[in-house]
Image: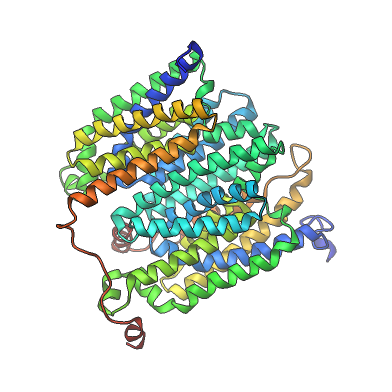
Amino acid sequence: MFSALMLNAWGSASIVAIVAGVVGFFIVLRGSAFAAHALPNGAFAGAAGASLIGVDAIVGLAVFSVLGALTIAGLGRRARHDVATALVIVVMLGLGSLFLSMTTEYAPEIYSLLFGEVLGVSSSELVPIAVIGVVCIAAVFLVYRPLLFSSVMPEVAEARGVGRGRMEVVFLLVVALTTTMAVPVVGALLIFSLLISPAAAARSFTDRPFTAMGLSVVIALGTVWSAIALAYLSNLPIGFFVGSIGAGTYAVGRGWAGWRNRRSRPRMGATGRSPATAQSS
Amino acid sequence: MPGFLSPLIEPGFFSNLPVQTALVVGGVVAVVSGIVGTFTVMRGQSFAGHSLADIGTAGGSAAFVLGISPLFGFVAMNLMAAGVMEWIGIRRPRGRDLATGIVLGAALGLAALFLYLDTTASSTTGATVNVLFGSIFTLPASMVPFIAIFSVVAAAIVLVMYRPLVLTSISADLAIAQGIRVRLVGIGYLVALALAVSLSAVTIGAILSTALLIGPAATALRITNRTGRAAAIAAGIGVVATWLGVLLAYDSYYWFPNGGGWPVSFFVVTLIFLVYLLSQLRFRGRSAAQRRSTAAQAR
């Protein structure tokens, strides 16, 4: 399991997990899970386009994820954010289906782009992954305070000169970079699980931002490591383990939070009157 | 067919059986997506609407393993997923995003497992692509009755609770004050959404499913503020885009690069996106205050 062949897998997956833990914390805080799903998924189309014109897949991923991020931020300024994201993802996937119809790629290769190929990462691929990973983390810490401020209290931050639109663009570009780095390793669909579940679980254990971010990195690392080990032992796809461990940790986090403030949380519920009264009025 | 149309419409378009099925099914799906999608956009649940298409993939690929029709896999999986989303807390605006994301992440893990089993069990490599992207042209005609039933049920749910649904979608507080059981309406709506998305994802693929659900409805809501009219316009835009897309895909058979034709989803998505951009330009002149209020609602 720890042979020379597997070292690249452990290394690249650990880098992805650390970046996903840090970036994921802000994704959960800002409620931008849809963008975190749309960018990797749409960037997949970029990889298909890159193979069509014969350039490296990572170039296609970078171009499509950055363009996608800018379009979401641009359209989102004048429409609902979720609508803008939905339109961007379908346009990118529509282009992807066009590219796929023109190539002669085998289905297993498409599968590996969607679900990752962590065991197939070569030493030469490790360098760009590490470099982009460092850039992502550096970018997050560079804008850490304004980003946190703008995520928690957008109106107040705006009044204090932290532009909401500008922060959104910066943040989506970080997500785009994360996508570029992570898709070749864990795949377009599973980077999403790694971005959301550990950070969401971490937030149910603590309210302090820095602690939550650290915890999120730890949970992401734990998820990836146990997923690789289980996949190695069972010969089942790694994505299955990432997905189910992610959901499991979130369930544990929710259970913990629920148990902790069972008494203080007010119950949500319906009022007693029937819908018929509303219809007649 | 009049002779002057022949440069636009390749010969044999209307007499081709897969094309006829595609036009009928695509039209039905577009109408249902337009009606249901209007509320999806109003309620800010585009993410859930899109996720259900991807989540259904897990059900669809499981159905492949079990050897049953993917439609039932999609429907069963999506109803379950909608239930879990509701339970985690899709009704609160802040938790909505996360509830959808967690369910999507878990379902994608399952999809990875089942698709892997598909590709190893049967050497037919098309399963992945087929489940993920669907194809309107390879639809068996025997599926049409099931599709019709599911679409009638989805549309009927929306129409039966039309008034409370409109009210809860505009303002939950107002609806509570009126004595509407907001949570019940929300659950009913999620069921309709799950049915509509399963239906469209299994017939025309996950991409088109989201495109038809969100694009026409978002455009229509730019044009009018009245819900009923918006739903009708959305259905109309969806049907026209789908039919034009099918026509263009049929015509593209001899385009570059030789053979095979371009995918329908590419054409339909492009048309829908262009119409949306046009509606943005047209209504750019609306007052800034109004725009700000829609932005505030979105949060």
Q: Nearer the viewer, residue B213 or B11?
A: B213
Residue B52 in the image, given as x and y percentages of width and height: 49, 54
| Image quadrant assignment for residue B114 | top right
Residue B63 in the image, given as x and y percentages of width and height: 62, 51
Is B66 on the left-hand or right-hand side of B78? Answer: right
Identity of the residue drawn at 30% across and 44% down? A252
Q: Nearer the viewer, residue A126 or B150?
A: B150
Extreme-top residue of the structure: A4
Residue A71 in the image, given as x and y percentages of width and height: 44, 43
Is A29 on the left-hand or right-hand side of A101? Answer: left
Quick check: A24 above or below B94?
above
Quick check: A114 above or below B284?
above
Is B24 on the left-hand or right-hand side of A67? Answer: right
Residue A53 in the image, given as x and y percentages of width and height: 63, 28
Q: Nearer the viewer, residue B281 or B273?
A: B273
Colouring scheme applied when the structure was drawn: rainbow
| Image quadrant assignment for residue A270 | bottom left
Q: Is residue B42 visible?
A: yes
Quick check: B254 above or below A238?
below
Extreme-bottom residue of the structure: A280
How many dots with numbers?
Answer: 0
Identity of the residue drawn at 79% across and 40% down? B259
Extreme-front residue of the structure: A233
Q: Is residue A167 visible?
A: no
State the quadrant of the C terminus of chain A. Answer: bottom left
